[in-house]
Amino acid sequence: MGLSDLWRRWTKGEDARAIERAEQESAMTASERDVDREDFEARKDDTAARSSWAGVDASETAAEDLDA
């Protein structure tokens, strides 16, 4: 199996996920799509925060505050 085979398999999986996502979005109402976009933006922010050294400390501190 070469690199090109791996690439084809990966892109095929991504295409399938994109089609599934489009089908889900087509079944959503406008307000559901807005909420979904907000959730996506929040997940992006969380991921970006956790990827920096300062963000990791902040997220751990926030988690401790929620547990208390």
Image (cartoon, rainbow, N blue to C red):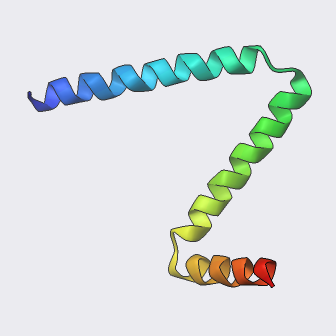
Q: Residue at x 71, y 77 (%)?
A: 63
Q: Residue at x 66, y 14 (%)?
A: 23
Question: In the image, is residue 11 above or below residue 38?
Answer: above
| Residue reaching furthest to the front | 68
| Rendered location of residue 21, percent (x, y) | 61, 23
Q: Is residue 62 left or right of residue 51?
A: right
Question: In the image, is residue 68 above or below residue 48?
Answer: below
Residue 66 in which image quadrant? bottom right
Q: Quadrant of the N terminus?
A: top left
Q: Residue at x 24, y 28 (%)?
A: 7
Q: Quadrant of the C terminus?
A: bottom right
Q: Residue at x 79, y 45 (%)?
A: 38
| Rendered location of residue 52, percent (x, y) | 52, 74
| Rendered location of residue 60, percent (x, y) | 63, 80
Q: Is residue 44 left or right of residue 38?
A: left
Question: In the image, is residue 39 above or below residue 29?
Answer: below
Residue 35 in which image quadrant? top right
